[in-house]
């Protein structure tokens, strides 16, 4: 039988009869990967979080494999270097699916983009990520 509980750090802990398996929340994935300016630290976060054969579904393209994922994350940082991702509420998880709403835009200003990430996981790492943009506003 599997039980799920949130611990003080905000992480979700899944207890199984075989072992305790700690799953970092989707908000940590988002910030560690997409808000990290240092390419080496970003690559390390991606390697820890995503499988080698991850598939990231964006509205205009699928991104396949971890190396291409790293390149796309770098492109996003280069397009808007002063913008940050912010969680839009708590992450939610059920079995192998995680969900996180997000806002994206300039620091200390209203977000320009809002959306959600939906991730499928296996053995505690993301195997597939769907990014759905729900709103795009004009920057202030």
Image: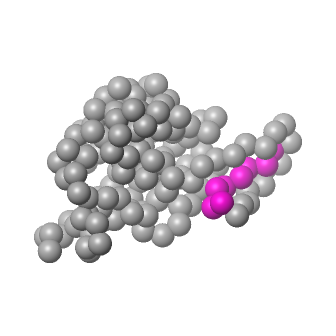
Q: Nearer the viewer, residue 27 or 32?
A: 32
How many numbered discs? 0
Q: Nearer the viewer, residue 3 or 103?
A: 103
The image shows residue 7 at horizontal and vertical percentages of: 72, 61
Q: Is residue 99 left or right of residue 132?
A: right
The colour scheme is one colour
Residue at horizontal 86 percent and vertical 42 percent from the top: 17
Q: Quarter of the image holding residue 82? A: bottom left
- Vertical comparison of 51 with 98: above or below: above
Q: Nearer the viewer, residue 27 or 64?
A: 27
The image shows residue 71 at horizontal and vertical percentages of: 28, 32
Which residue ends up furthest to the right in the rendered image? Answer: 17
From this viewpoint, is residue 113 visible?
Answer: no
Q: Is residue 104 left or right of residue 7?
A: left
Residue at horizontal 43 percent and vertical 53 percent from the top: 31
- Vertical comparison of 38 with 95: above or below: above
The image shows residue 74 at horizontal and vertical percentages of: 27, 39
Q: Quarter of the image holding residue 105? A: bottom left
- Vertical comparison of 90 with 52: above or below: below
Q: Is residue 75 left or right of residue 30?
A: left
Q: Nearer the viewer, residue 126 or 35?
A: 35
- Vertical comparison of 105 with 46: above or below: below
Question: Which residues are the magenta region?
Answer: 9-16
- For the C terminus, the quadrant is bottom left
**Is residue 53 highlighted in magenta?**
no
The image shows residue 69 at horizontal and vertical percentages of: 34, 34
From this viewpoint, is residue 66 visible?
Answer: yes
Residue at horizontal 13 percent and vertical 70 percent from the top: 138
Q: Is residue 132 left or right of residue 96?
A: left
């Amino acid at each position: 039988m599997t039980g799920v509980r949130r611990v003080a750090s905000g992480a979700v802990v899944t207890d199984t009869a075989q072992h305790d398996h700690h799953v970092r929340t989707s908000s940590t994935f988002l910030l560690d990967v997409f808000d990290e300016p240092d390419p080496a630290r970003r690559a390390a976060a991606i390697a820890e979080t995503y499988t080698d054969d991850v598939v990231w579904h964006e509205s205009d393209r699928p991104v396949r494999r971890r190396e291409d994922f790293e390149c796309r994350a770098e492109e996003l940082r280069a397009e808007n270097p002063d913008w940050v991702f912010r969680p839009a509420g708590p992450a939610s998880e059920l079995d192998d699916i995680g969900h996180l709403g997000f806002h994206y835009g300039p620091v200390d200003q209203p977000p320009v983009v809002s959306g959600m990430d939906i991730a499928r996981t296996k053995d505690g790492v993301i195997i597939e990520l769907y990014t759905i943009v729900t709103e795009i506003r004009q920057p202030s």
